[in-house]
Amino acid sequence: MQLFLVSRVYSTSVKIPLERPRSACKQAPVNKNYIGYARVSTDLIRQGVSMDNQQVVIRNFVAHLNGTLLEIITEEVSGQDDAREGLERAIQLCKKTGSILVVSTLSRLGRSVRKIQNILDSEVEFICVDFPQGTRMHYQMLAVFAEYEAKCIGERVSRCIQHLKTTQGRVFGSKKIKDVQKKGVEGNRKAAMAYNQDIVPMVQGLRSNGSTLTQIAQRLNSLRIKTRYNKEWSCTAVWRLLNHSQVTTN
């Protein structure tokens, strides 16, 4: 139905058509490929529940859109940390597969204006489940509030630590923490390489013979070979193994 604005000028009626205002809400694309991303700041038990909740929210959202969820990438890192290997891998995977990045909330991507702006400028489309109609302007405004919230949290934590130091003599942190973290990362890398060195040749052989990722995963599971995390193999896990072996050899 078309609307008109009636204006009387010198005893004449002029009908000016008015456009019905269009909704500014962005409809989430259906029947698309999606890459999920979930993040928690620490490995506490309470945070583990949060990680599970994020994955459930992402899966339900993609299922509601009749989309295909290729993978959910998870990592435990602070939102203010720029070294976000999981997020970078999710962005690159979206570019490679033409998928849409989906997160439960904007804060999972980061709590700084610069971080959100970099993602917006990466030419990768992303959707926040709690605000799927958000536009570029909305996300920029929300990033300002997220950064302010992160600053307030840091100030409260600093005041609390200082209070415990002065009133209870508590000691926090260690001068050797960076060395310990470095040794831990190196140890995990060596453990992964040692665990996979016997599996990679067999997987590469099956792949060169024309087996699909799903067939390789089924073969490994039939042989009761578990992943490094004591889980059954999936096509995604096989893809990661082959991709990591190529990076290591190169």
Image: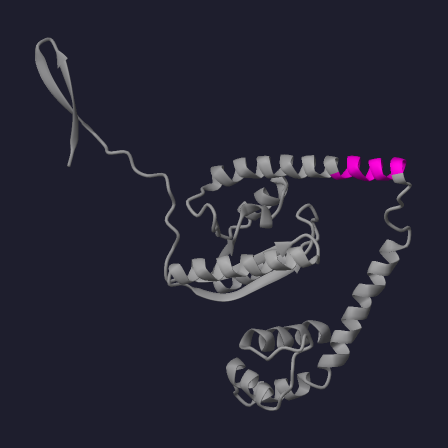
Left or right: residue 182 compared with residue 107: right
Majority SS type along the magenta span: helix
Nearer the observer, 120 or 64: 64
Estimate the x, y position of residue 216 in percent, counting from the top left: 56, 85
Residue 121 seen in the current view: no
Residue 162 percent across, percent down from the top left: 84, 36
Residue sitting at x 60%, y 56%: 50
The quadrant of the picture occupied by the N terminus is top left
Left or right: where 174 falls relative to 121? right
User: In the rendered view, would you say 120 is above or below 47?
Assistant: above
Side of 67 relative to 200 (left or right) = left
Q: Determine if residue 84 is in view.
A: yes
The percent coordinates of residue 202 (x first, y second) are 65, 88
Name which residue lies at 63% across and 77% down.
Answer: 231
Identify which residue is drawn at 48% across, 38% down: 138
Q: In the displayed structure, would residue 159 be above or below residue 94? A: above
Residue at 57%, 48% in the rendered image: 119
**How far across and down, in percent of the image, does residue 239 sit?**
58, 75
Q: How is the image coloured?
A: one colour
The quarter of the displayed image where residue 13 is located: top left
166 part of magenta stretch: yes
Please, which residue is most extreme toward the top here?
10
Residue 17 falls left or right of residue 71: left
Q: Closer to the camera, 56 or 238? A: 56
The correct choice, above or below, for 191 with respect to 185 in the image is below
Q: Quadrant of residue 10?
A: top left
Quick one: quadrant of the C terminus?
bottom right
Q: Where are the magenta residues, as a range?
A: 157-167
Q: For residue 240: magenta?
A: no
Between 108 and 86, the one lying in front of the other is 108
- Count of numbered badges drawn on the protein: 0
